[in-house]
Image (cartoon, rainbow, N blue to C red):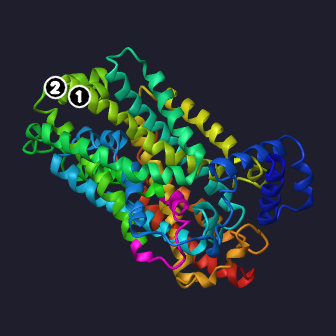
Amino acid sequence: MSAEKVGEQATSTSLSSGGLGNTAIKSERGLLAKLRAFEASLDSKLGIESEAITRKLPEEKGPVPWHHELTMFFLWASGTMNTSCFATGFLGWEFGLTLRQSILITIFASILGGAATGFAATFGAPTGLRQISMSRYAFGWWPNKVIAALNTIVQIGWASVACITGGLALTAVADGHISLIVGIVILAVVATVISFIGLKAILIYERYAWFVFFIIFMIFFGMTSKYADNSTPTELKGANLRGQVLSLIAIVYGSSASWQTMASDYYVHYPVNISRLKVFLMTTFGIAIPTSIGMIAGCVVSSGMNNRSDWKEVYENDGLGFLIQTMIYPRGFAKLILTLLVLSGINVNVISIYSAAISCQQFARPFARVPRFIWIIVCFAAILGLAVGGREKLNTYLQNFLSLLGYWCSQYFVILFSEHVIFRKMNFNNYDLEAWNDPKRLPVGIAAGTAFAIGIIAWVMGMVETWYVGPLGKLIGDSGGDIANEFTFVVTALVYIPARYLEKRIIGR
């Protein structure tokens, strides 16, 4: 079949599944048609998923061997056990908390955030829909566009952090001869190529990549744990201590919870009857355990700076990459470790870029007609801009970005959970899955839009960021205590549930 015919067939399929109509067909005769034909021809040769957002029907799915089901764990292990999590582990020390306090918070908050993502992941196999498409059944057609935009920002932000931390490692490997900017570009380019190919390549890559980083972090523990400071008490007392604990919980929770807006993207190919409990547990702990390993390694090393002034000096003056080079010996082995750690940034970027591109296609119907590979290129450019612009302020970036992720992801979880448990009775038969791309058959979204908007006000009141401290957060200690997640969770639930009852009663959907 020629590339043109393949393109015409793919366009026809996309338009019929998206309900775009004759007007859209006419508009596809120019540049977009040629781009879609090019994408379709690549799909036929390389399997790059030219119709990634289209619902995967039950009859299109085959059985998945048990050892491939383990990918549900390993995918997230590869995406989370990285230098970004390692860098986040330093924040407890910077907040003035003890090693024991930092470790306990890391484990608790990682499981909490991982559970939210695990719940979202259970929607992929039964529905065959990507996470943002699935969200339409709770948020409605129009409010869900905001969710698509926010998810794109989340994934681009995560990828930017990964580029910075990986770039720092690459700079240290080259003894400063490679600039941080060059390191960032290299990481972004490699991850973009893998994301371009599509889901099959991603699953194969991520299925095995985690093992390398597990070994690296075990080496970190083995070489640095003897310097860990588990005896110096915190100087924080009372409200000041509670405030810093709450703020660190918000950051770590945000790190794990932020995956939920892309979770089902990687489960649509699994059979409809796969155990949802298995999906939940493997996703939850596939995020929580590797995240905890990476962050606890950061906790241990940062506490060790109390006993190793040379570590502290290198960290403050030269950055994370050179600190790793200093704490690992011999020097040649340290360079090997740093070289491998560069790849951890690629792991995050691969899944982030892939899901960000899918979200872009769901901003609006004209955006869906733009081929996925074009959105990948756009996301690549945005990642470079953010990473290069924020490269000198990594810890500030982490503190602010990860907290913000948790705020709105808490709202997302409340609305998705309430819709599924209360209004859909935890039964996927109560979803009109053929309506996934038809605004006339989906919820209007008044309840979700109202609850989300009021929830934003709630988390603004409780947030603690370097650039703003909300009036409620300000009440806890001298530096404030971040209670935005807790407050927006309650407010969003209190607004959404009664509003959704009214919406269904008055509008009927």
Q: CA distance from mark 2 to mark 1?
A: 6 Å
Residue 466 in sight: no
Which sits in the foreground, 288 or 454? 288
Which sits in the foreground, 106 or 477? 106
- Answer with left or right where residue 254 lies relative to residue 323: right
Residue 20: quarter of image = bottom right
Q: In percent of the image, x 67 and y 43: which residue is there?
A: 373
* Amino acid type, mark 1: Ala
Q: In percent of the image, x 44 and y 69: which residue is there?
A: 65
Residue at which label 2 appears: 330
Tell me how many marks there are.
2
Q: Are marks 2 and 1 in contact (CB under 8 Å)?
A: yes
Which sits in the foreground, 508 or 135? 135
Stretch in magenta: 260-278
Which sits in the foreground, 283 or 93? 283
* Amino acid type, mark 2: Pro
Query: Above or below — where is 454 with respect to 177?
Result: below
Give the structural element (helix, strand or loop) at label 1: helix
Query: Above or below — where is 367 with respect to 219?
Result: below
Percent across and percent down for residue 146 are: 65, 55
